[in-house]
Image: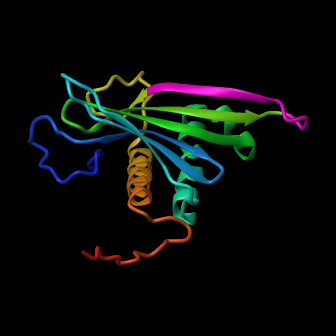
Amino acid sequence: MAKSNLKEKEETTGKTTGLFIKQIKMKDNRALITLSDDNDFRTQNGDFNVKDEVTEEFKTLWHNALEIVVALTPQLGKEVSALRLNHIQFFYDKKGFLSDVSFSVIWTFDSQGHVLNLNYTKFPIHKPELSETVVAISGKHEELLHEILKAAKAYMNGETRTKQTSLNLTVVK
């Protein structure tokens, strides 16, 4: 399985430190990313906003996440073209691995533009020890979530639609 917090660590290590991607919200082809640590003594939060648009790959991954919503609510399968994923919220366990996910989806259900906000709150990532009656995120959808997290990290590192290059400025004394 992929590692959820995109940090290089062993599966046997204890608590991980650093900032985690807690939420990704898409607005006007830009990703608004909320970061937070998981420290028991203090919490550091921050928002990461870039004025440039996301790459086509990120946009495709984001749209593909609607597959997860349709898997959770099969009745929406025929309405997928009327669905828009608003945000994904990520939850991590004490070791720093992805444990639960929440979705917010906007459904335009008629030609007049009326919408319903569909909130999918805290669905667990499938684990073998879960009961068969628990609705959980499947393995292939977990991999898609990890790909979205990787794309968000690349976006924060400057991989945008225009992919601006470094100016290589030097400080003159």
Q: As drawn, which residue projects farthest toward the front? A: 173
- Tell me residue 142's x, y (percent): 39, 45
User: Residue 131: horizontal and vertical position, in percent?
Assistant: 34, 22
From the top left corner, tell me how far across and down residue 38 is, in percent: 25, 31
The quarter of the picture where residue 47 lies is top left
Q: Main secondary structure of the magenta part?
A: strand
Using the rendered view, name the quadrant where residue 106 is placed: top right
Which quarter shows the C terminus? bottom left
Q: Where does the magenta region start and end?
A: 110-122
Number of residue marks: 0
- Nearer to the camera, 87 or 47: 47
Choose top left, top right, bottom left or bottom right for residue 94.
Answer: top left
Q: Is residue 41 magenta?
A: no
Q: How is the image coloured?
A: rainbow
Identify which residue is drawn at 26% across, 27% down: 129
- Is 27 situated above or below 15? below
Choose between 173 and 35: the one closer to the eye: 173
Q: Residue at x 40, y 75 (%)?
A: 166
158 versus 19 height, above or below: below
Q: Residue 148: image x %, image y %?
A: 44, 52
The residue under the point 70% across, 41% down is 83
Q: Give the camera-side residue of 41 and 9.
A: 41
- Magenta-span inclusion, residue 120: yes
29 to the left or right of 43: right
Image check: 132 left or right of 105? left
Q: Residue at x 22, y 51 (%)?
A: 7
